Structure formats: C-alpha cells, structure tokens
Amino acid sequence: MATTDLSGLLPEAVSQLLRQGAVIPAHPLALNAQRQIDPRRQRALSRYYLDAGAGGLAVGVHTTQFAIRENGMYAPVLEMAMQTAQDWIPLGGQRPLVMIAGVAGPTSQACAEAATAKAMGYHAGLLSLAALRGASETDILLHCRAVAQVIPLVGFYLQPAVGGVVLSAAFWEAFARIEQVVAIKMAPFNRYRTLDVIHGVVAAQAENRITLYTGNDDHIVLDLVTPFHVKRGDETVQVRIRGGLLGHWSVWTQNAVALLQRCQQESAREQISAELLALDSKVTDCNSALFDVAHEFAGCIAGCHEVLRRQGLLEGIWCLDPHEALSAGQAEELTRVSQAYPDLIDDNFVTRHLARWLDG
C-alpha cells in the first residue's frame, strides 16, 4: 500500500487541543430492533457529545463494537460521525475537534481501515492490537509501523479481559519511538501496566511529542490529577495524563467535561482538594455498574446503552451480538449509582436538548 505524507501530522488547532487534554467519548452504535443502524439516533449521539463540550469523537472503537467490521458498518458509521461533526453547530459555536477512528485487524485490514479513515478526514487511528494476540512484540511493532505509514497513531493498551494484549515497558519505549505516534490511550485497568507505558514514553524521550490519555475507566480522576515522576539517567521527568478517551465518557458526558476541567485547574495549582480526590471512588463506583464489573465486563457495552436508553437517546440496548445484554442485577446497579451520585449524571441537560439532537 502506498504511504501517505504525514508531514505536520495534525492540523495545529487539533494538535493543541489534543496536547492540552480533552474529553473524547468512545462513540456507541445506535441500532434498531432489527440490529441495523438507526441513522437518526446515531447522529443524535454525536450531536449530544458535541453539545456537551467533548473535544472530539472516537468512532469504530471497542464501544462502537468491533463487529461493525463483519457487518459492513465500519465505513458508514465513520462517515456519519464525521459528517455530523462537520455540519453540526454545537452549543457555544463551532470549535476544533479531534476525530479519531478505531483501526483493527491484521496488518492488511488495519492499513485499509486507516486509509478509509484518513480519506474521510479523521486525524488519527486508535490502533487495536487484539488481532495480534499471541504474536511477538517484534511482530506487533512491525504491524504498528506499517499502519503508522498511513495515518497518525494513538496507541491503545486495552485490558486483556476484553481482548487486549499484555505488553512490556520495552515495547512501549519502541512504540513511542515511532514518529507518527501522537498519543497513547492507556486502558489496561492495571496500575503496573499503566506505569509501563509512562516509563516507556519517557525512556524514548517522547513525552513532549506523545500525549497520554487515560482509558482506565476504573481510575479516571486519579489518573488525571497524578504527577508521574520518572527517572531518566540523572534527570527526573514529570509526566501527566492530559485527557481521557473513555467508554465511560460515552454517557453523562457534560459532567465528564466539567470533571476534566476541574482536574486540570486543580492540577495546575498543584493543590488537589480532598473533595476532588473523593470523587475518584464515586466515579469508579459508577463505572462498576456501567461496565458490569461483577460479571467480568460482560455487560460493559449494554450498560452504556442502557443509560442512553433511559435518557431517550437510544431506542433500545441492542448490540450486534444478540447474546450481549445487561447482566443480572446490572440495571438495578445503574439505578443505584444514578441515585447515589446525581452530581455525576447529566439527565437534565439531555432532557433540555434531546429534541434538538433527534430532530435537528
């Protein structure tokens, strides 16, 4: 496959937004009862995220369901989100957006998906490595370098429970040396493996080029306020996680935007309040219900759908896999956390603007 000129990598406004840190929801898939795309509600979801203040969209990712590829939905779903992002005038006016496309599969498929996304105007590809499970780190790096010739990359450390591959700090150092890598989403749901990524980026002297984003839905707040100090020779390098690219942020998004702003403001003052620290466990409790931790994440996508259904954004919680649904007791858990943490949900915001998103 012919390579694409990646000089400049990203438009300046997009690069600045990515570097300062943004809320980037992982975009769900709106289906009807026949498990076909519901275009009206798919567009409504994108409009909701933009009006809520999201800094971009991540489409064709785990939350969108990897099975869109087997169902011929990959290109239509990406096209719909990009068209909406270009045409919709969000509350507060138009602004730069970071548009990220999920890229998956073996090298030939991933490069083809990257080319499709690039042609549509997506800025970067979130590179899933699930298809390379069992491959050596050397082979995985060859794969990454090939895809990086097509589109700038956002690395993706996905937790093994939902298809991720365990990778070493040495891998992340080598990955961070790929010049077309602009960010890494860390989602291993594991403190040790999160540190492996950070140490790898610092060892590669890439901390000023690569922006770190949390995908650790189990540890969002502390990821966003922790200064990471890493030794590199005689030097101590401080690194921060700047934003989040999260399935959790596909729901209650307006409050996620306010949460990130608060984390950034308190981090800048280097004085984190006890109240903000206490939010970490509250957000994690919400995620436990949302992602169905009690059943090893079996209902993680259906849980997001259920919140959006209750708000009126989705008609139902259908997934492409008919067996993928809420687990026993998960609906009750979602009700519990919604009632326990009203300051973390955005039902009132959605109610005010739902008609605009559905019929605009």
Image: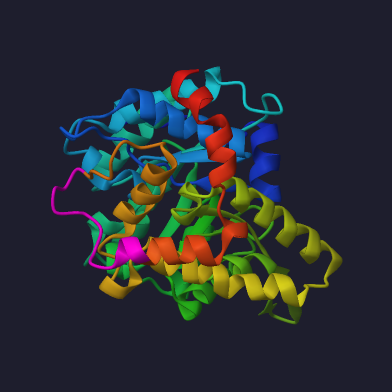
Which residue appears farthest toward the right when viewing the image? 269
What's the coloring here?
rainbow
Report if residue 98 is visible in the image.
Answer: no
Q: Position of residue 260 (x, y in %)?
A: 67, 55
Q: Position of residue 278 (x, y in %)?
A: 65, 75
Q: Is residue 223 above or below residue 84?
A: below
Q: Is residue 21 left or right of residue 352?
A: right
The structure residue drawn at horizontal position 67% and vertical position 24%, both measured from the top left corner, is 94
Count of numbered circles in the view: 0
- Return the residue nearer the eye: 163 or 12: 163
The structure residue drawn at horizontal position 53% and vertical position 36%, both measured from the top left corner, is 351
Q: Is residue 88 left or right of residue 64?
A: right
- Return the residue nearer the eye: 358 or 126: 358
Q: What secondary structure prevails in the magenta region?
A: loop
Q: Is residue 190 above or below residue 332?
A: below
Q: Is residue 320 above or below residue 131?
A: above
Report if residue 280 is visible in the image.
Answer: yes
Q: Is residue 206 left or right of residue 71?
A: right
The structure residue drawn at horizontal position 56% and vertical position 30%, both measured from the top left corner, is 353
Q: Position of residue 262 (x, y in %)?
A: 74, 58
- Return the residue nearer the eye: 136 or 193: 193
Q: Is residue 12 left or right of residue 329?
A: right
The structure residue drawn at horizontal position 26% and vertical position 46%, both measured from the top left corner, is 66
- Return the residue nearer the eye: 260 or 67: 260
The range drawn in magenta is: 320-332
Q: Is residue 187 above or below residue 260?
A: below
Q: Quadrant of the N terminus?
A: top left
The question of residue 331 being in magenta is answered with: yes
